Image (cartoon, rainbow, N blue to C red):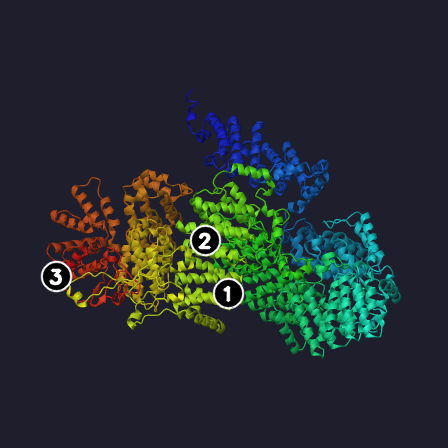
Amino acid sequence: MGDDTEYLKLSIEDRCVHKSWKARLNGYEEAAKLFSKLDEKSPEFSKYLGLLKKFVTDNNAVAQEKGLDAVLLYLDNAAVAPKTVGEVSTGVITKCLNSARTKTKEKGMEILLMYIELEKGEIVQEELLKGLDHKQPKIVAACLTVLREALHGFGSKILPVKPIVKTLPKQFENRDKNVRVEAKLLTIEIYRWVGAAFKAAIQNVSPVILKELDEEFEKLPGKAAKQTRFLKSQQDLKAKMEEQADAEDDEDEEEEAGAVAADIDPYDLLDPVEILSKIPKDFYENIEAKKWQIRREALEAIQPLTSNPKLEPGDYGDLCRALKKVIGKDTNVMLVAQAGKCLYGLATGLRKKFQPYAGQCIQTILEKFKEKKVSVVTSLRDAIDAMFPSTTLQAIQEDVLTALDSKNPAIKAETSSFLARCFKKSKPANLPKGVLKPLCSSLAKKMDDTLPDVRNAAAEALGTVLRVMGEKPLNAFFADMDKLKVEKIKEASEKVELEVGGKKSKPAEDKKAKAAAEPTKAPSKGPAKGPAKSARPGARPATAGPKGRAGGDGAKRPSTAPSGGRKKGKGADGNEDLTSDPLLTDEEVAEKAEILLPLSVRQPLESSNWKERLAAVEEYTKFVENMEKKDMQVQVMVRVLAKKPGWKENNFQVLKGKFNLMKMIAEKGKVSRRAASFVISGAVDKIGDTKNGSAAGEVLTALAEATNLGWLATEAVGYAFDDQKNPKNQSETLTWLSNAIKEFGFSSISPKFYIPYMKKAFGAVNPAVRVSAVTLMGVMYMYMGAPLRTLFDDEKPALLKQIDTEIEKVQGQSPPKPIRGAAKKSGGGESEGDDDEDDEVDEGAGGSAAMEDLVPRVDIGPKITSQIIEEMADSKWKIRGEALQKVQDILNEAKFITPNLGDLPPALKARLADKNKLLATQTVNICQQIATSMGSNVNKYTKIFAPGMLSLCSDNKASVRNATVTCLKTWVELTGIIPFFEDEIMMSALSTENPYMKIEIYGWLEEVLPKYRSIPNEGVMQCIPSLYSALEDRNADVRKKAQAAVPMFMMHLGYEKMIRMTSKLKPSSKDQVAGILEKQRANVPAKPGKAKKASGEGEEKRKEPETAVSKEPEPKRPKTAPSKMRAAKSMPSIPGEVNVEKNKAERNNALIDGPVKGSLLTKKGKAVLSKGKSSKKGAADEDTGPALIANNGKQKRMKDESDLRTLKWNFQAPRDEHIDQLKDQMQGTFSKAVVTSLFHSDFKHHINAINTFIDCVENNKEAVISNTDLLLRYMTLRFFDTNTTVILKCLEFISALFTMLAAQEYHLTEFEAYSFLPYFIVKVGDSKEPVRRGVRNIMKLITKVYPASKMFSYLMNGLISKNSRQRQECLEELGCLIELYGMNVCQPTPSKALKEIAIQIGDRDSGVRSSALNTLVQAYAIVGNDLYKLVGKLNEKDMSYLEERIKRSAKKPPAKAEKDKKEEKTAKPDQKKGAMPPGWRDQFRNPSAGPKPAQKESKIPREFSLDLDKLGLEQTVSEDMPELVDNEVDDLLNQPVKLPEPKLRPASPSLSRLATSSSASSALDLAISQVASNDITISVQALAQIDEVLKDEEKSKSLYNHVDQLLVVTAIQLRMAYTKYIGDDDRSRENVIKLYRCLIACLMSLFQNSTLAKRVSREVLKDLIHGLITVLLDDRMATEFEDGPQVVRSVNVLVVKVVEKSDHNNIMGALIKLLQDCIAVETVSLKFRELVMKCLWKMVRMLPNIATNMNVDRMLLDLHVFLKTFPSQTWKERGNDTPLRTIKTIIHSLAKILGNKILSHFSLIEDPNESELQAYLQKVLRTGTGRRSSTPKPTSNVSQINGNPVNDSTDKTTAPRVEETQSPRRSGKSIVLAQIFKKISSKENSREGLQELYDFKKKYPDTDVEPYLKQTSEFFRSYIERGLKCIERERDGKTATAGGDPGSGIAITSSQSSDDLSPSAYRDRLKVLRARSGLDNIGDGKSIGSGLVRPDSAPASIESKPPAISLGTSSTSIPNTAPSSQKTDTNVAELKKRLERIKKQSQT
């Protein structure tokens, strides 16, 4: 029995795969228990990923059932469960669904449904469909059951029906009854979800089964199918549906059922059929045959093909043209009917794809409706109805209007019926006014037709419009119709059954009641009496004078005036028809006047005495003032006022009183057009009067506001030019109209009416009339644009020049917003009929829309002859060119054309692909000209020309591409972008591989897409795969343009949708594309807002324009903001600058009612305030911990942001995503109560939270520092607030925070600074002085925690702002920084910075100008007259300002010491800084810092000191000066060698500050930034300062956090030296060598400090090694520089030092990565690669000593990446595999050191099993580590490492090889020899090894060492031979020269020397000792070395020596600044004595 339970000792996973079923049973049970306990992300689940299939396929039924239980628990609990769907689903289908055990079968089905729930429905469905082909009927039936259950639970959206439908017919024919039953049940279930649309897809099922199914379908309830099982991501939906389940009633369910049924189109369930290839070859020939029988046979052959319900898209152009020709021209009506059926089939089968052919076909069919035969008309009617869904009414509008105007009544009737059917299928949104209005106008005329069929069809069409759109669009037409006709239309409307949802109509009774009520309503607005027919509409009353005619249509007009210029009825101008206010007779007026007005008013008005008339007018005015609006009868009052003398009053005072009174009546009463018509002529007659002209104009304006500008202007202009001849009146009338258009807008103006009058005015004799017309032209141009200019091309050149001049004045200006008219309409509806929808026209678009009707258009169709078409297709390019020229001439002659182009489009389309690029370009230009000439009607040809135009973007010639892009822009302006995204046009263009096409199209789309609010997503989504491909294109320009286009696509699709579409990309591509999408997410432009009607509060807006609310869409307010915020209209480039709307009332109500309500909800959708008191109390009770918690989360947040895992804190206005992210990041470190307060809607909670932070600054500093980034980011959110109290509290906290950080010597990281400073700088321009004062105080603190040079850059960005106050403050801060830190603070360079500052001198704001000048004056005080060079060229005015300010400032430029020519050539430190002590400006700027201790006053005269009195400083502020030591020259010469104390000038302010300040961080930052200066002198000076700090052990600690920063700028300067400085003739070679020495010395000092050396990061080390090796390999150092070799040797030593002293993990990783980069770039030299490998070999030798302390996991990852990038098999193709052998040597060494333990260090490698590294290590471990090492041989013999020739450093190859070739049983001599050769190969013991080898050969002369030498390289053998000869000469008493001793280099490097050396060797050692002692190396009167560089106030004897920096103890690191001179040989003995004296002195 013990054996049976042995398996219990095994692990669970081992038990699950045990051969015993009992063991497996136990394993499954234990696994089930384990799965139910684990967390969903537990790594334990991953162990079972490969075992689940065995669970479900277990052969033992009992165990299998338990395994299924375990799998169900696994799927329910494991996050990785979806990964197993493939193999587990297959196992379940094959092994469980056919099981005899019911439970097993049920559990298997449940597993499949669980996978669907885990969103793997596609894979499960695919596997189930595969199961339907299984041989076992049981499995097939079970698969059908699962599909049915899945569809029943999840619905048709989650489980697509289409793949299932295709399999059903086969299942109905299955032999097994169960399969057929399940198929039937599945079919019923599908019908339950899809509805009647499903029947079309199963028509090929046998009739018996189909009948059974129909019966079952009828039994189904009418309720909609509902989803009962939900995906894991739909749990919220599940809860929502459960809540709504009880509330739904039957009516809603029926509506939902209809909606569900409509979701699926049966067309989508069908497979397309390809028919083009099946068309008979002779079809096109037969269709043209003369015999009608042959033509019939041709049609009969294709009719079955076209009758397929769904056709494959393709080029059906030829077929459609052939059928269209049959319909249009064939005389046999039978063939016409048959062709119509074929077109019907094509249109039905292609649907939207039929669009390119619909326009021409519809035109032909409409013309063919003249046929009388019913069968023909029926066929054509079906065909045209099938075509309409593929096009739009706008596209066929011209053809339809032409057909409606036909003389044939049959065509008119059928066209009207066709329109009625079209309207039924259209939604209101698809019937814009521009389309509906001309159609309804034409249909309204057909209501007067003599034939009843035409009238009935027109009534039906208009009735359909009435049902779809409502009565409003038709009111204007109903006004002119008889009541009977209107009733007929309304009756037809009630009978209409819409196919698409229209406007909801009330029951018929309500409609009739409403209709009956309206006639009674209208008369109540006018007088009680007066029949409507007493006078014709608009007829002028008798009192208006004989010529008068102010308002009627019946009045005559000259032939130049358009007949339809003045509108009747409720037309587009939006006012009531004249009939609404009936014309009163004179008697009626008199009667009403007696009742309304007193006699004292009426009678004197007709008096002959002007004084009586004046008194009557005044009394009349007072009477009107006291009248109520409802009592005013305006027509009566106006006609009383107009009685003789009326408006022809001779006395100007009386006339002025009348005009003022009329204005009052117009403003106070309800003025109708009828009443206004009695005033217009009088006002126009007097508008030119000098005394009353302005009053007359005001009357016209008041009347226009009371009625409508469009109507009144037509009457006024018509009267001025037709009925009176005074040019002054004509001129003033046009001037008044120009001003009125600006005030009222252009929406009600009909330009077509004014064009003839403007032309008449242009031809007037009086110049004032011409000038006024030109002015009106300019105003209209603002609204209508360039097309208006083309209407006047035939005017005289002189006049055209005037017009062009006027146009230039308004070019680019946007039309002003209307301030009149709209206010009264929305203010109370006082003007009758003012709400007409035609007033809602967009101001900007009104003119352009009207351009379509302004000009007569020419039909060029007949001119495009067949000859031209044939010539365009000719094989000779000249003939084709001539044909194109003919077309161009036709277009030029016509100017404006109708949409009829005849057969031109197909011919032009072919020419777009012409091989001759000149012809292709000409064709593009013709296409552009067609678009311009045709206008918006060109839309019907877009899909014909668009593919060809887009394809031309791929041309190699830029001229062709530019012409094409220009043409595309023209088309898009007229047609919109949408047609280009339909029919896969854009997708096809972008899918090509041509880079030019992608560049041009993406560039074009970048400009075009932001202009459109919405584009159909389907077309845009088709382009996304091509976009993603372009983001990874090899062409950089393609990638750049694609990235720029990403935000435009994202604007229309959204970020989430685009991210989801990356799932189909490869993993590597997906990460890259997702990163780009995340970066571009912040650049998504806002969608353009919809055009809106003017606000109703016009009067208030005019009074207080500054408080007007913008009509643009308001950006979403962040969740944290308590008040409403708006982003500025034009944002500057720096993020975060916004224009905040100050509205306190909105802030108080924003949470409840405003649009911000949604943004204040939490993620779960619950508002913060909805929690109530109990939630607040609960939060307070449970949250008792500290407000802030210290942790290490900041580093993770930095990493997440750099890896693009979180959003970057970069925005113009904070979005919800940023706020949610910040809230989430605060959750772990901020207490719950604090987070709630921070994001509360009440600002008081914000203040409380900030007070808590202020307390934490004092009491919990560690927590505040660890969360600084989150705190500062929250402050930026509050900066967008408008509550001053909150902002001031934020500034108080920031001030306290920075003060604490400065005291703690904490410095802001870039991560913290970039997310705070841009938004902080915006607040410096705040409108409130307390805020600005607080910001300025914080500015003083920032430089203590952040480098001033970096702060300078942020302030420079602040100058871009449009806020002048912000620019001014930033300039003042820049001046302070320059004053404090000198010119080196200017970034990126002083020249660029000062040029930007100088630009501000020309600013409009005086404060900005003054601040800019003050800042430049500060710079002048430092650099003197060089300022003028730095600021560059200024205009004369700005330069005069600058010079004047410098004079007035009394600032003197720094004096320059007089130097002779030799001294001028030597490099000098910057003398332009003042000699003030460090920190004095801080005291002056911030007195609170406290005074500095007094310093001793220098006794030395200070000729170049600053004038402290003028600066306002005390004289006690001074600087210590060194005391000079007087030395006699003779004494110095008499002493053999005396070591003087070097007396150097005191350090510069920056150096002094660096050395003495307790907080040296700011000075270090400045000094480090100066290292990278372009000025070598400044750079050397900074290096000297840093070198001084490095040599001081205490001060060097301040560099602890700046090591990487220092090395980065050092590497930059190295790179600048060998790339720029060496080849620059302007820089002396001595300076370049000096720079090299200083850099090397500084680096040497740094790497001698082991603490600092360990701080260097891996990437910085990589760049540093790269730079140093580049210097080593620079041949110019040896050939062009005398001291170059010495520099190279120093660099050589430095490289070794870097390798030895750096952190071993970092240097190893850096070297491996550098080697990898070298191999990847083929241009890298072999020498460079070899030196990198030599550094690695040195690391290999160090491995035994350092391996235990290294991060082996990290090292193995680097090695793995190398081998993955360059696998071993790829090296066979390379000539040299040394790099691979080097890497394998490292691996071999690690294996040798660590043994089998190394296999446990693969934690960082994702898949070790697939890594070549693991395989190689296992191979090494199996074979043992004692075999020969694969260390490669060196191949170069030029470069140096460690002072030895590269080819001599064979220590890494020779010794191991000699040792490894010996037998395991070695003799004693062999062991000794091996040890000797090992020493020789070591650089430290090389000479010792040679001596031992020499002694060994002497002792054992018979021993043969040749076998050992043969194992080494030839170079190494020669090295040994030379070494042995040298030792032999030494032993014999000969002195070996330094050059002859091969070990001399090593001996010097290791400070080992023999007693007898050459004079040159003594000189070198002398240099070393003098350098160590701080002395100059002087020889032959020239310096050969020096100490540290000091500033230039030292004595001349020291200052004149070129500076250098000591490199430490190694002789190879000694810099030699002076050029070497010829040296005479010196006596060796004398040199020895001198050397001894120096040694003794240095020891004392």
Residue named by callout 1: 1408
Nearest-to-viewer mark from 3 and 2 = 2
Which residue is most to the left? 1932
> Type of residue at label 2?
Ala
Nearest-to-viewer mark from 1 and 2 = 1
Nearest-to-viewer mark from 3 and 1 = 1
Residue 904 % position (x, y): 66, 65
Please name whichever residue, 460 or 1774, is drawn nearer the observer in this view of the structure. Answer: 460
- Relative placement, left or right, of 72 versus 1738 is right
Residues under numbered marks 1 and 2 in contact, where contact means CB atoms less than 8 Å apart: no
| Separation of residues labelled 3 and 1 (CA atoms) | 75 Å
Please name whichever residue, 1702 or 1348, is drawn nearer the observer in this view of the structure. Answer: 1348
Q: Is residue 1155 above or below residue 450?
A: above
Label number found at residue 2029: 3
Which residue is most to the bottom? 765
Mark 1: which secondary structure?
Answer: helix
> Type of residue at label 3?
Ala
> Type of residue at label 1?
Val
Residue 1283 % position (x, y): 56, 52
Residue 1986 % position (x, y): 25, 62
| Residue 1862 visible | yes
User: Number of marks in the image?
Assistant: 3
| Separation of residues labelled 1 and 2 (CA atoms) | 26 Å
Q: Is residue 943 above or below residue 1227?
A: below
Residue named by callout 2: 1313
- Relative placement, left or right, of 806 versus 47 is right
